[in-house]
Amino acid sequence: MNTDTSPARTTTARDTLEAVPVFALDTVLYPGGPLPLRIFEPRYVDMVSDRLRRDAPFIVALIRDGSEVGGGATTHPIGTLTRIVDWNRQDDGLLGITALGGRRVRMLDTETRPDRLCVATARMLEEEPASTVPEEHRGLVALLRRLLDQLESRYRHATSRFEDASWVGYRLSELLPMPLPHKQRLLELEDPLARLGYLTEVVDTLSDRGAR
């Protein structure tokens, strides 16, 4: 349940984005999270080139039906606005990029272009209310610190905010082993403390399994 009691903000034209490319993936990207990708399909090579040239975002969304390759996949309506923060030409000639998650968005309408690239009209969702990590969830912070110590290179473009309930929840959501529908649910949650509560249950379940 969303505990934010502030008045709802009126949606303005600045909250709506037109014709934003959609990258359909078998993964969930969270705000502030890094996403390394190898680009080989022509539609995405062209899209990445365009986004780099314009310094413009695209949307990463979890596939609901279909596959990553070939087009025609349908996605969940809530995804993450994403910008490219690094790129390189890999040894096999493919384009490698690192994207960083930004604001969550809800796709209101989509269109598939002749090159099979999907573009969307999307509305940016409200940012979560600022919340510190409560004492009962401090164990999650310790766990996250241990995990990130092993993943320094992956998170070199991310700014650590271990007191921020949203940031801690998003990082554990992307790192802990969970089914993709559960990860999507955690993206769609609007209450950072509810997300931490869910993650505490996940960690307890994983600990119980490991103890058997």
Image: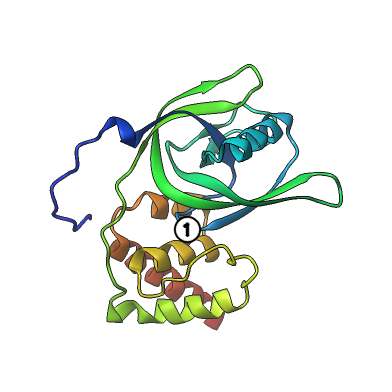
Q: Which residue is found at the position 13% from the left and 54% from the top? A: 5
In this rendering, the count of numbered labels is 1
Query: Which residue is farthest right?
Result: 92
| 179 shown above or below 149 | above
**Is the residue marked by circle 1 packed among few (<14), some (14-19), or many (20+) residues within 10 Å?**
many
Q: Residue at x 33, y 53 (%)?
A: 189
Q: Is residue 106 above or below residue 147?
A: above
The percent position of residue 66, horizontal first and vertical second, equals 60, 33
Q: Which residue is at a point 29% across and 47% down the rendered structure image? A: 126
Report if residue 177 is visible in the image: no
Residue 131 appearing in the image: yes
Locate residue 115 relative to residue 168 in the image: left or right. right
Task: Name the foreground residue: 150 vs 76.
Answer: 150
In this orientation, which residue lies closer to the viewer: 76 or 162? 162
Q: Horizontal placement of 123 versus 20: left or right?
A: left
- What residue occupies the far top of the structure in this picture? 114
Please report the residue visible at 51 percent of the width from the left and 58 percent of the height from the top. 33
The spot of residue 102 in percent (x, y) is 45, 50
Q: Amino acid at mark 1?
A: Gly
Q: Secondary structure at mark 1?
A: loop
Q: Quick one: quadrant of the N terminus?
A: bottom left
- The residue pinned by badge 1 equals 32
Could you say which quadrant of the image residue 43 lies in? top right
Residue 23 percent across, percent down from the top left: 58, 38
In the rendered image of this protein, does residue 146 appear above or below residue 130?
Answer: below
